[in-house]
Image (tube, rainbow, N blue to C red):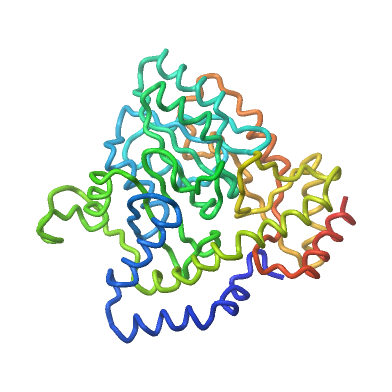
Amino acid sequence: MQFIDLKAQYAALKAEIDGGIARVLEKGQYIGGDEVAALEEKLAGFTGRKHCITCANGTDALQIAYMINGIGKGDAVFCPDITFVSSTEASKLLGATSVFCDIDPDTYDISPESLERQIKAVIKEGRLRPRAVVAVDILGNPCDYGAILPICEKYGLILVEDAAQSFGASYKGKKCCSFGDISTTSFFPAKPLGCYGDGGAIFTDDDGAASLCRSVCVHGKGPRGKYDNVRVGLNSRLDALQAAILIPKLRALGEYETDRRQDVARRYNEAFAGALKTPFVTDGCVSVYAQYAVLADSTEKRDNIAAHLKALGIPTMIYYPTPQHALPVFADEPRYGETFANADDYCARTLSLPMHPYLAPEEQDRIINAVLEAI
């Protein structure tokens, strides 16, 4: 059994994917070109953003978002304590300081209350400049933008939406990747919209920001092309083959894959009600369930479930075993007295089960029965 079955997805989309790859090979244009332009237009339309700029991966997308906003030494970037390291290392590479915030105990996204406490603590200390918030739609579940946006406006902070796990999800009628000053996503193969390698994208409604992103993606190019280098940039481009692969995958995500993810989650939720803490999704929102994460009563019970499923050939994962504040790379970041109790509790008890839109009912029955046996 596959944790995320990319082979099943390929079988369903084989004719379209193979056809797209063949067209690229026939044309012989592998960087830029029609496929990349078409994908960017479709991605912008899907999210409701004015501009989409593709790049080499989701981490680059975040770094470029920070670069064009001048994030650097002396700046505080407020981050959720539960996320993958790429959400925070991108600004750290530029010299900024990561200020972690606890998570909401229900959604596992950044807690607006903890965010405001940490902003106030930074202001009171006076050593760092509060500059940006990176809001990560963790596990495919949208952040509480109704609370986060006013906080950013109140303190004059840039809001970066990290939608690496949430492409296809929505918050009260608006698609993820449409929030904040700038938003980013990842096309890593395991993501809800994944390519067959690395890829990423940046979204904005600001013409100037879009122009800067395109410049940074190609070695800081100027108006006269790639040999007119006007700023320090990166070599960060999505290739045409990946774009050709993503176009049919985007269609499938919009037409049926997100709905199928809801069906799988619904069956899990019904089966585990009262036995495990199942994912919470705010009314009016849609999670894309990049991962289906449950909480067991304790670490011991979590580990027992995982061991039982492994013995039966059923894969599980832990997203994430260590909160950001406890990673060695961030040992010197300021804490400001925040305890991160919710993040610590989440890491101690979380377990993710197989989740993808091609999970057959009989496979899901096998998973459900195994989990309930373990409990």
Q: Position of residue 205 (x, y in %)?
A: 33, 45
Name the residue: 50% across, 64% down: 194
Q: Quadrant of residue 55?
A: bottom left
Q: Position of residue 347 (x, y in %)?
A: 66, 41
Quadrant in which the N terminus appears: bottom right
Q: Position of residue 103 (x, y in %)?
A: 60, 33
Q: Nearer the viewer, residue 4 or 157?
A: 157
- 312 relative to 352 in the view: left or right: right
Q: Residue furthest right?
A: 373
Is 280 drawn above or below residue 335 in the view shown?
below
- 304 relative to 172 in the view: left or right: right
Name the residue: 9% across, 58% down: 224
Q: Residue furthest top?
A: 124
Name the residue: 46% across, 17% down: 120
Q: Quadrant of residue 266?
A: bottom right
Q: Quadrant of residue 291?
A: bottom right
